[in-house]
Amino acid sequence: MPTFENSDSTADNVHSDRRFGVEHGGIHKPIHTSVQYGFDRIEELIGVFQGTLKGGYSYARQGTPTSAALETKITRLEQGVGTISFATGMAAISAIFLTLLRAGDHVVSSRYVFGNTNSILDTIQGFGINVSKVDAGSVAAVEAALLPTTRIVFVETIANPGTQIPDLVAIGDLCRARGIVYVIDNTILSPALFQPRAVGASLVVQSLTKTIAGHGTALGGAVTDTGLFDWTQYPNIAATYRKGDPTLWGLQQIRKKGLRDMGGTLSPEQAHSISIGAETLNLRVQQTSATALALAEWLAAHPKISAVHYPGLPSHPHHAQAKQLFKAYSWLLSFELHDAAAMSDVLNRLQLPIKATGLGDTRTLIIPVAPTIFWEAGAEVRAQMGIADGLVRLSVGLESLDDLIADFAQALA
Ligand SMILES: *Cc1c(COP(=O)(O)O)cnc(C)c1O
C-alpha cells in the first residue's frame, strides 16, 4: 500500500498545492484558464497523449493544473492513490456507473441514498444494468442481493435526510471477499470526519459542493481510488487501460471515459474556489458537528418534536457504529413535529435558518423534505426510504448555538 510521509490531513489540506511547484512564489495555487497546452518539442506532446510524460496537459476537458492541485488535496485527505474531479457530485457518481458497468451487470445500492443518485440508478436500468436497492444497515441484506454479475456495491456514509448508516465494516469485508467494487459516498462526513478507506472502500465519491467547499458558491465532485481494489480482476477494464500500475487502471478508465468522452469537467475557477474552501474544512466540521449535536439534543427534549434523526444521539439505531468510526456526527440532522400540519407555520417563524435546499453551507439551511426534494419520487418511494410527510431537514451552519436555539424556541413556542 502507498504510504505518505505526512499523513496529517490538516497539514496536507492546507499545504498540498504547494508541494508540487510554486509559481512566482505565490503561496496559493493560481487559476490556470488555458484550454490548450503547447510544447517546445513534438515528442513532449506525443508523450502527453501516450501517458508517458507525467504531469503533462493537452486539453482542459481532461484536467488542468488547477484541478490537479485540488485532486492531489482530496487524494491526500482520503489517503488514496489518485482522484478525478468533476463538475458536480452527480457527474462523479454517474461517471462511476457509466464507465465501470456494462449491460448485464448488477449493482447493489443502499435504499437510503441521495435522491438524484436514486434517480440515476433508475436511469441505468434502462441501459440493461440491474440494480437492487436494499436496507444496507444490515450486511445480510446486501449479501442476499448479490449475484454472480454484481460489480458494484454503493452506499453513503450518512444518508440524507434520514441519517441511516450502512453496516460499513461488514460490507467492506463482504466486498473484499467477493471481489466487488465498494463505492462509498462520503459527502456528508468528508474525509475530515471519516476516511472510507478504513472500512475497505475501493472508490470514495463526494460532492465537493457540500462539506469540502463549504461556502455554497461552487459545484464540484470527486472520485478517489483508495488503492485497495485489485483492478486486474475487474472484467470491464478495456485493454487500452490495462497498462502501467494496475492500482490506477480504474481511474484511467474513469478519466478517459468520464471526463474526456462525457465531458463533465470541473472548471478551473470552481476548482480554485473549492480548494480555498477546503482549507478551513477541519475547523468548519468541528464547529458545525458540535452545534448540530447540541441542537439535536435540544430538539429531542422539546415537547412539540416527535423524532430527531441524528447519529450523535444514543437513541439513533446506528449510534454505536457512528461513535466507533466517525470523529464527529456531521452537520446533518432531521426531525419530525408531533403536529405535521403546523410545519409550515413553524418554518415560517424561523428567522435564522434559510428556507432553501442544499447542504453543508456556512449558513444553516432548512427544508421540508416530502413536498420538495422527494416530491418527484412519489409517496411509495418516500415510504420505502423512511421519509415521513412531516420530516424537516436541517443543514447546520456556522451560526452560534445560542442564536439557533433561541430562534427554534420562539418558532416552536
Ligand atoms: C449533493 C449530493 C450529491 C450530488 O452532488 P452535486 O454536487 O449537487 O451534484 C451526491 N451525494 C450526496 C450525498 C449529496 O448530498
Image (cartoon, rainbow, N blue to C red):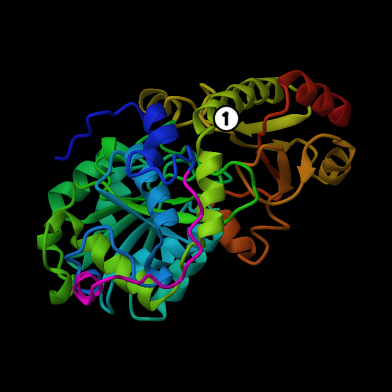
Left or right of 41: which side holds 283?
right
* Amino acid type, residue under disc 1 in the picture: Arg
Name the residue located 25 percent from the left edge and 52 percent from the top edge. Answer: 143
Give x and y (percent) for residue 97: 35, 67
Residue 76 pos. (x, y %) = 33, 39
Secondary structure predominantly adopted by residues drawn in magenta:
loop
Where residue 286 appears, as percent x and y from the top left, is: 54, 24
Q: Which residues are magenta?
A: 29-47
The picture quadrant where one finds residue 334 is: top right
Query: Which is more toward the observer, 296 or 216?
Result: 216
Relative placement, left or right, of 303 versus 179 is: right
The residue at 48%/45% (across/down) is 187
Asked whether residue 279 is drawn in magenta, I would say: no
Of residues 88 and 319, which is closer to you in this image? 88
Q: Which residue is mark 1?
A: 284
Residue 111 in sight in this render: yes
Residue at horizontal 46%, vertical 66%?
265
Q: Is residue 95 left or right of residue 87?
A: left
Circle 1 Cα neighbour tier, 10 Å, few/some/many (<14 / 14–19 / ≥20): many
Quadrant in the picture for the C terminus: top right
Q: Is residue 46 above or below residue 221?
A: below
Which residue does the image show at 40% across and 49% down from the upper left? 69
Q: Could you say where residue 81 lies in the image, as x and y percent from the top left?
A: 24, 47
